[in-house]
Structure formats: C-alpha cells, structure tokens
C-alpha cells in the first residue's frame, strides 16, 4: 500500500461530491451580504431553484441544515393540538413525526416497515376515512434516506389535495435528482438541503412555500423566530435574507445551479436513473441481497445487506482503508445490518463502476464468493 | 481609475476578513461528517472555544446564524408567560426582546437611547425592585452591533446572579475580541457567531450553556427541535452533531481557533483595543463627531456621524467605488444618520490606517474641511 492516498470519495447519502467550480466559488473571500453583488447571486439562485422545482411561488434560502427546513415548514403551518398525519417508513419520516409532537401537535402515523413504501392506496384510505377532516397536514418523506425507499409522491399529493390537508414534503435526498414539478403536482411545501443532489457542501437548506402554506401560516400559533416564514418572505422579496446568510455557500449555490441549468433536468434525471440501475445490477451480480424492492427503489441511495459472514463494519473499513471510498452504515435499528451507497449530485457512471469494483475487491478479500468482474459487467450492461 | 480593482475589503461589523489559511481549509472538499477525522476537528474546535471563553461547561456548534444561537438560548430556558427583563439599547437588544415575545414571554425592557449603554446602577435598581423575583431571565447584548456600544457586563452579571435570574448574553460582536471569562463572570448562557472576531465566514454560531441554563432547560416548555439544547448536548458529548453540520466551516473553525490560540488572548484583546483607539482618534482628527462616548465605546465597531453636508450614502459609495472598502450604514432609524466601521477579527493597524486615509480622501473629494494627513497621524499617535 502506498503512503500517498487518493482523496476520500463520498458515496454516502450526503454530503456528496462537490464540483471544483463550486468549491472555488466557496473558497473566495466572503463579500458583504448587504451588497448588490450578493443580492444578484441570491436572486439568480432563487430563480434557478424555481426553475428546478418548476414553481412560480416562494422559495426561501436558509443558513441551516435540512432539518431546519422541515422545521420552518412544520412550525409555520401547524399549531399545538392540530391533528397531523405523518407517513413514516424510516428514520427521517419518524423525525418529522417527533418534530410535530415537539410543538404539541396530535400525530398519527401511517407506517410501513423500514425498506418499504407506504402505498398510495393506504394513504387514500386513511384520508377518505377522515370524514371530519381533522388532519390539518400530511407530512411525507419523498425519499427516505435511511433506507433508499422512494414514495410514489404524485398520486399521494393528489389524495392529500382531494382531502384538503396541507402537504409537506421532505425532498432532502430527492430534489434535483428526480422530477418534482411542485406546482403541477400541487405540493404545498417542499423542503430540501444543499449537500445532496444540489452538489454543495452542507450548510444551506431550501423551502418552497406555496399559497396554501400561507393560508395555514395565517392561523399558525407555534412560536418561531429564526425560522419564521414571514421574515424570509419579506427579505427575500427584496433579494436579501432576514439574518446574516452563509455568503460563501450562496455564491457556490449560484454556480452549482447554473451548472445544473446548463446540463438540463432531463439529462440530470436520466443520469440518476442510470446510476440507480447500475448500482442495483452490480450489487446483485456480487451475490448481494438488495434491501429495497425494484418498485420503490430510490434513484439516489441504494441500501444492501452484507453477506451473512461479513460485517458491515468490515466492508466499510475495507472500502475506506484500501480505496478511500466512503459508504454509509444503516441508521438506528439498521446499524450493522445494511450499508448504503449514495449516488446523487456530482456523481457519474465511472464513480459507480469504481465503487462496485472496489466493493468486489473488499468482499473477495474477506472470503465472499462472487464471479470476478461480474459487478462491473452487470453495471455496464445496465 | 484603473480597470483592475483591489479585492473588496470588509470594514463592516461582519462578515469580517478571513485569513487565507482558513479559506483554504474551507475550500477543501467536504469530508463525511460521521467520520473520526470530522470528530477530531470538532473536538479541537470545541476545546479551543472553551479556552477562549475560559469555561469548563458545554459549548454547542450550530449550523446557523447568530440569531439562531440566541434562539437556542431563549427557547430552551424561557417558557410562555415567563417574565423576562431585556436590556435594550439598539437593534439587536430589541431583536431579543421580540424573540422572547414571539415565544409568549412577558417582556419588560430596560432601555437606553441608541448610542448609550444601560448603566450597571439602572440594572441593579431594576433587579433590587423585583422583590417577588418575577424575572426568570435577563437578556443583555454585550456589544450592540447597531451602534458600537459596549455594556459593562461583569458587574451586570454579578447583579443578575445576586437576583437569581438566568443571564443570557449576546456576544456576537464581542466574543474573541475582548475578555469574557464565562465561568469567572458567572454568565449562564453566552451566544456568538462565526463571522466576527472568530475570523470565519458566516454560517456557524456557538452557544455556551452553563449549569444554571440546564436547570432552566428542565422546566422549559417552549417547543423547539433544530435548536434543542438536549440534542446538541447528547451529540456533542460524542464529538458529533445532531444534524448534518457545515463540515467546511467546522474545518475552517478549527484552523481559525488554532491561529487565535497561537496568538494568545492577551495579544488579541490588546490589538482590538489599539484598533479602537486608532479609529476613534483618527475620526476625531477628521473633524467628525463620534456617535458613542469614550466610556461605553466598543472595541470592535465605531459609529460616527457624517459631516453635516455630506450624506452617509456619498461616503459609503466613495469608499466602495474609489477604494473598494466597505463600511456599514446605520440600521433602521439610524440609517443615513451614522456610518459604522468594523475593526474586529483578522484586522490590523494597517487596515485602520488605510480606511482612515481613504475616508479622508473621500471627505476632501466632497468638500469637507480637515487637515490633510491628520487622521493617519492621530491614529499612529494613538
């Protein structure tokens, strides 16, 4: 083994690889945040976020993690004692349920086991049964980061709109990687983060806040200040922020979104779909069992069981020490039971091939039986 | 005028200049946040923050602006209907009063006009008059950024401790520039931000959370999630963060604090005091009237009136266009009435001399009468 090592390569579900042009924008000395130059960058970023989300409505740029974006969504529209339906199939779905409970809402969970999606039908039935229309809001995690399960969100949003509740969607690990036309699909609030498909380091998050969200905002009694939607609306209408923003990341955001615009959504979404297929076929060719069925498999994260006789720790350590490639462990009760490969943002075919080849090497080192070269071949066929 | 321009130089009250070594750390590709390398950087930063604040107690690193640090302080210790005393002498003091009102607290303001400090005596009398001990907490802005007024915080903290209320101190534009031994002065909660004396871009903030803050936390009923102190305590005890942190800025923080440790607090604090004196003497030599009296003048920000016949806009525009030096306008009702020069963090004697010389040039361009070279001479004498 050489002393010189390649740079740590992130195949985890965030942070994800960042393009050099974005790093260069971030590396520049910060400018003043109450200047025309900063306002211009912010305005460009907001317009491109609206383009990416295909929406004409408000979008807020927060200096905070993705969890804060969901908190803005929830704490600005749900009041203590309101009834909320939370669609839960993993760590993040459960997080938003607990967040709603933290403000005093009455939370009902519509759950699926980890690794599975809640079906459209289950949600439709649940909402049809709510004759009194007690549910003020439905919170759904589009792409459950802890397992790599994607919800069939468009018909779910239709069911919510038919019922009349507000829809709040966590798209932290889906936005910018798969289609999500916010206005067409009638999503009321969509929240996401910088360090996933948007090709930035962590530190910013984004909230799309539609007209029905403002209706709920008028009635909302939950205390908030840093995450008060009205403060963001007022400032961002004037191309500025209510509190000192992360200037460096906003400059990087402008560059990243410009790059995405140049590539075009069709190409971006097709690439993520290809990476998903390559990853899944490659893992199967390594004789590994996928954690998630084809019909609800995420385009951005693939979870997989280790072979029965090799620990997740051994695989992760092997990939890290031999190849400096990072993949993620399972979270909470899935820790040590699955590992997760992120393939979103500034990630390409060659990165998936590299990861599969490295994984094959680590598995063979540890006595796993699989056909040499099969993973890469299967990925290339996919 | 040449087409080639020098880099925009920040003499505003934040963001402030960032050392190249810190920018270089930030520019590196982000590493995974659940890795030993990240935990090591976070641990080092936390230890150096404790060193800088001379405290053995908890400190939290938040991915958010300074306002969020105050929100963590207030929303984790004050409940709706609690009585709170807010010491208010400017925009930020007023912000914390409104933040407390936002959660439903009963707020009483102990105010001084903008440009003045609330006296120790006024606070002592107010607290002595509170025989029923109704005030659960007292919130003070150590250094009021909107005016450059510093409170005589040590005896104020002593008065609060004598009364028994919890002390919450905004040190956003003072921490790291002037002495603040947290444990010795018995401050319960101290909140600050990254983009001031700590020589980083904006995007992180910090909360020192002492033992009496935990007592208040136990009783606190205000809803919170992203800014829940207990979540930070749990994660940071394990050298990690409860939510995805701004990895890049934490790496920069580690470097910035290491640089501060190498300089030593005595030298840092003495430099800020010198910069204050140089700025004040230089401005006086330009025949300008200072906004704040000597006895409560900030070491980090100096506010000054423009000459009667020259607008603040003209001065700021002249400094920006001719010299690419940024100074700040007044805020809210002081907009256009004063301008503010920031001199904190990675700022040195030469920067103050440059700013004074440039200001002299802009004033003379606009017909102001002052002795040529007097500002720089006065600053050098100081």
Image: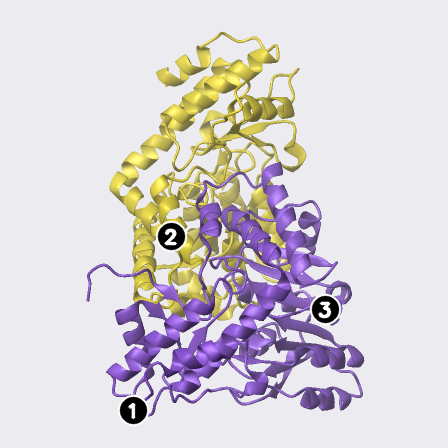
Chain colours: A yellow, B purple
Q: Are marks 2 and 1 in contact (CB under 8 Å)?
A: no
Label 2 sits on a secondary structure element that is loop
Q: Position of residue B295 (x, y in %)?
A: 59, 86
Numbered disc 3: secondary structure: loop
Percent coordinates x, y for residue A138 in the rendering: 51, 52
Chain label for disc 2: A
Residue B198, located in which quarter of the rendered image?
Answer: bottom right
Q: Residue at x 51, y 34 (%)?
A: A12
Question: Alpha-carbon neighbours of circle 2 within 10 Å: few (<14), some, or many (≥20)?
Answer: some
Q: Quadrant of the N terminus of chain B?
A: bottom left
Q: State the mark number for residue B188.
A: 3
Q: Are marks 3 and 1 on the same chain?
A: yes
Residue beneath label 2, please? A28
Of residue B174 and residue A48, the one placed in the foreground of this image is B174
Question: On screen, B322 above or below B47?
Answer: below
The Cα–Cα distance between marks 2 and 1, rounded to whole angstroms, is: 37 Å
- Please indicate, yes or no, whether residue B373 appears anywhere in the rendered image: yes
Chain ID for label 1?
B
Q: Which residue is mark 1?
A: B309
Tell me which corner region of the image, top left, top right, bottom left or bottom right, holds residue B66.
bottom right
Q: In terms of sequence position, does the residue under pointer 3 or pointer 1 come before the other?
A: 3
Distance, label 3 to label 1, CA atoms, is 47 Å
Q: Is residue B299 above or below residue B208?
A: below
Q: Is residue B226 left or right of residue A269?
A: right
- Residue B236 image point, x, y percent: 67, 49
Q: Nearer the viewer, residue A97 or B223?
A: B223
- For mark 1, give the secondary structure: loop
A139, B86: nearer the viewer: B86
Q: Is residue B94 left or right of residue B51?
A: left
Vertical position of residue B105 compared to residue B196: above or below: below
In x, y percent, where is residue A162?
Answer: 42, 52
The chain carrying label 3 is B
């Amino acid at each position: 083994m050489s002393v010189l090592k390649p740079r740590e390569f992130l195949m985890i579900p965030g942070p994800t690889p960042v393009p050099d042009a974005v790093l260069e924008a971030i590396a520049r000395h910060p400018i003043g945040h109450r200047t025309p130059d900063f306002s211009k960058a912010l305005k460009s970023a907001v317009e491109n976020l609206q383009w990416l989300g295909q929406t004409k409505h408000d979008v807020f740029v927060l200096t905070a993690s993705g969890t804060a974006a969901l908190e803005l969504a929830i704490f600005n529209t749900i009041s203590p004692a309101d009834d909320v339906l939370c669609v839960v199939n993993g760590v993040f779905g459960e997080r938003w349920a607990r967040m709603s409970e933290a403000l005093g809402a009455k939370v009902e969970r519509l759950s699926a086991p980890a690794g599975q999606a809640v079906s459209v039908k289950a949600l439709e039935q649940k909402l049809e049964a709510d004759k009194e229309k007690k549910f003020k809001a439905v919170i759904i995690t589009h792409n459950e980061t802890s397992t790599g399960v994607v919800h069939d969100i468009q018909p779910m949003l239709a069911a919510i709109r038919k019922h009349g509740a507000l829809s709040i969607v966590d798209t932290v690990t889906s936005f910018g990687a798969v289609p999500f036309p916010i206005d067409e699909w009638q999503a009321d609030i969509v929240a996401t983060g910088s360090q996933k498909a948007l090709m930035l380091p962590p530190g910013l998050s984004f909230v799309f806040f539609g007209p029905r969200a403002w209706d709920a905002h008028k009635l909302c009694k939950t205390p908030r200040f840093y995450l008060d939607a009205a403060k963001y609306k007022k400032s961002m209408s004037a191309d500025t922020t209510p509190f000192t923003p992360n200037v460096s990341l906003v400059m990087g955001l402008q560059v990243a979104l410009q790059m995405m615009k140049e590539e075009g959504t069709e190409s971006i979404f097709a690439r993520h779909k290809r990476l998903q297929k390559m990853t899944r076929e490659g893992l199967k060719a390594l004789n590994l069992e996928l954690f998630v069925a084809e019909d609800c498999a995420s385009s951005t994260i693939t979870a997989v069981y280790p072979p029965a006789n090799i620990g997740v720790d051994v695989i992760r350590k092997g990939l890290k020490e031999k190849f400096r490639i990072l993949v993620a462990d399972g979270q909470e009760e899935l820790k040590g039971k699955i590992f997760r490969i992120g393939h979103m943002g500034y990630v390409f075919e060659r990165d998936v091939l590299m990861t599969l080849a490295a994984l094959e090497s680590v598995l063979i080192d540890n006595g796993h039986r699989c056909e040499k070269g099969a993973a890469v071949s299967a990925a290339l066929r996919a």
